């Protein structure tokens, strides 16, 4: 028993050390990525302020924008997996549904992300940061010729480090890995990801300072008498979040009507952003500055509605063009605007005290993100860490729960899972006889809990090869009883993996 515990401790120490290396490299890389984007965005805003006095310089800017869009387009053509946020690609990589080499993705994503996000487009830095961190983990595992399970752990820890460095939110980064990427809990993945996230966050804090990314100053606790308003806002956020999901997933249908190759779709947002930047340079970027200014600038309801429509439409155009950039921060900024809209309406017509406006801005960010990503725990902790206050966990949790129930009842699925399904549906597998092992968790709501293996009708083209339980591998037999928190390792063909996962989820869910 002592020898066994010693072996487990050695294993965990081994992954702590490797997770630390991933965290250091990812923290430095993503911090440089983030700093470069911030500086570039400032220069772009300064240029537009200058162009307001010297409009002829816009001719030069149009030519430069076309050149940059074409250059990024060729980066995407050479490596299509750098397009979009990168989170679906990381999920697909971990599920063995997507395959790519780490270094071509890393350097192209780094350059393409800086040029796309830093140019002022309505894109976020967090998705590319997650893919950059995941590529670091993939590269390190390749250097050490790690086995497949270790490669997945290091990729997960790199993704966690990337999000932590992008937003200074290490706990939310670990929750994101559990809730959005893996959809199940693994102590070793969580431990390694936590180490990477903490170290990457430390490096980022050293560069950017200790103040939270979305620090809004002092806020009053929201009284329970206003929770009726939170209920209404949660319902609205759920409906609007489902609308966002549908619109985002329909974007290829609209962009495919353009008479240019898909890797040059970026020309559209690069050109359309010019008039926006010329007249409203302070609105450029992912949206964090807008969130910080919502309460201070004293927007009217009319201006807030126009601001929401502008950012909603152009964030769709920016993301739908396949440019390297995420939707995390644009979603949070849209949620904040909706919170300001609802809060201001409540102040003007429902008697809400004006000093509670900040509360509605903060709570709506978590609710809207939950409605779109269907990851409520990540949303709650992410917003908490970004605003630097733990006094609002109850309203955050309440609105997130309401929004989740609404979007679930409307048939919404996690947006990154839907994007991965779309990505995989476009993928062509060259070798249809390739065998892979997929992981499937036995959760609390699964009918498999307490069921003998022989009593379940398994999908065709599958073979249950191993049951992982409490860090032990169990060889399955017909009379083996499955238990909650088991992880099933199932052998199948590569071209059946996605269908097998969907069938297992459908057949094992308690009705």
Image (cartoon, rainbow, N blue to C red):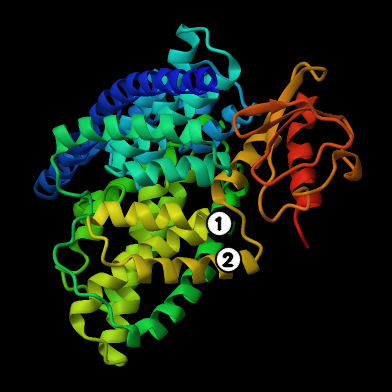
Which residue is under mark 1?
Answer: 245
Crowding near pointer 2: few (<14 within 10 Å), some, many (20+)?
Answer: many
Closer to viewer: mark 1 or mark 2: 2
State the residue at coordinates (26%, 34%).
34
Depth check, front residue: 69 or 208: 208
Left or right of residue 249: residue 382: left
Give x and y (percent) for residue 247. 56, 57
Left or right of residue 249: residue 190: left
Answer above or below: position of 338 versus 109. Answer: below
Crowding near pointer 1: few (<14 within 10 Å), some, many (20+)?
Answer: many
Q: Quadrant of residue 470?
A: top right
Q: Tell me the quarter of the image containing the C terminus.
A: bottom right
Q: Tell me the quarter of the image containing the N terminus.
A: top right
Which residue is under mark 2?
Answer: 407
State the residue at coordinates (78%, 50%).
508
User: Mark 1–mark 2 contact, CB under 8 Å?
Assistant: yes
Give x and y (percent) for residue 494. 75, 25
């Amino acid at each position: 028993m002592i020898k066994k515990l010693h072996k487990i401790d050695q294993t965990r120490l081994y992954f702590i050390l490797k997770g630390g290396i991933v965290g250091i490299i990812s923290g430095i890389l993503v911090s440089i990525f983030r700093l470069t984007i911030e500086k570039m965005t400032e220069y772009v805003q300064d240029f537009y302020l200058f162009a307001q006095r010297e409009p002829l310089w816009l001719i030069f800017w149009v030519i430069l924008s076309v050149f940059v869009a074409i250059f990024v387009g060729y980066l995407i053509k050479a490596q299509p997996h750098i397009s979009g946020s990168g989170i679906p690609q990381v999920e697909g990589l971990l599920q063995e549904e997507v395959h790519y080499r780490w270094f071509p993705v890393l350097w192209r994503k780094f350059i393409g992300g800086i040029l796309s996000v830093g140019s002022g487009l309505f894109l976020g830095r967090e998705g590319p940061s997650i893919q950059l961190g995941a590529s670091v983990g993939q590269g390190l595992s390749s250097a050490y010729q790690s086995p497949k399970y270790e490669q997945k752990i290091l990729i997960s820890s790199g993704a966690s480090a990337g999000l932590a460095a992008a937003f200074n939110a290490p706990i939310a980064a670990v929750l994101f890995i559990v809730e959005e990427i893996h959809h199940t809990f693994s102590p070793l993945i969580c431990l390694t990801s936590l180490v990477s996230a903490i170290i990457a966050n430390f490096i980022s804090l050293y560069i950017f300072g200790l103040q939270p990314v979305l620090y809004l100053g002092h806020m009053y606790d929201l009284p329970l008498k206003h929770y009726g308003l939170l209920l209404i806002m949660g319902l609205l956020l759920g409906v609007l979040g489902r609308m966002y999901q549908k619109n985002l997933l329909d974007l290829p249908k609209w962009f495919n009507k353009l008479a240019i190759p898909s890797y040059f779709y970026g020309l559209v947002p690069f050109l359309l952003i010019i008039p926006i930047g010329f007249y409203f340079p302070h609105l450029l970027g992912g949206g964090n500055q807008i969130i910080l200014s919502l309460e201070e600038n004293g927007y009217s309801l009319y201006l807030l509605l126009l601001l929401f429509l502008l950012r909603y439409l152009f964030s769709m155009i920016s993301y739908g063009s396949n440019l390297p950039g995420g939707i995390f921060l644009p979603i949070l900024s849209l949620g904040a605007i909706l919170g300001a809209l609802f809060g201001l309406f409540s102040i003007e017509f429902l008697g809400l005290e004006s000093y509670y406006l900040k509360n509605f801005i903060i709570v709506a960010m978590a609710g809207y993100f939950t409605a779109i990503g269907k990851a409520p725990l990540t949303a709650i902790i992410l917003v908490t860490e970004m605003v630097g206050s733990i006094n609002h966990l109850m309203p955050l949790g309440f609105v997130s729960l309401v929004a989740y129930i609404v979007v679930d009842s409307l048939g919404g699925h996690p947006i990154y899972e839907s994007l991965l399904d779309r990505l995989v549906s476009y993928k062509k597998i060259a070798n249809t006889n390739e065998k892979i092992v997929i992981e499937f968790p036995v959760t609390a709501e699964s009918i498999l809990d307490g069921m003998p293996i022989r009593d379940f009708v398994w999908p065709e083209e599958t073979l249950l090869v191993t049951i992982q339980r409490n860090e032990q591998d169990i060889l399955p037999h017909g009379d083996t009883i499955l238990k909650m928190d088991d992880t099933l390792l199932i052998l199948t063909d590569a071209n059946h993996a996605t269908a097998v996962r969907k069938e297992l989820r459908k057949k094992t869910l308690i009705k």
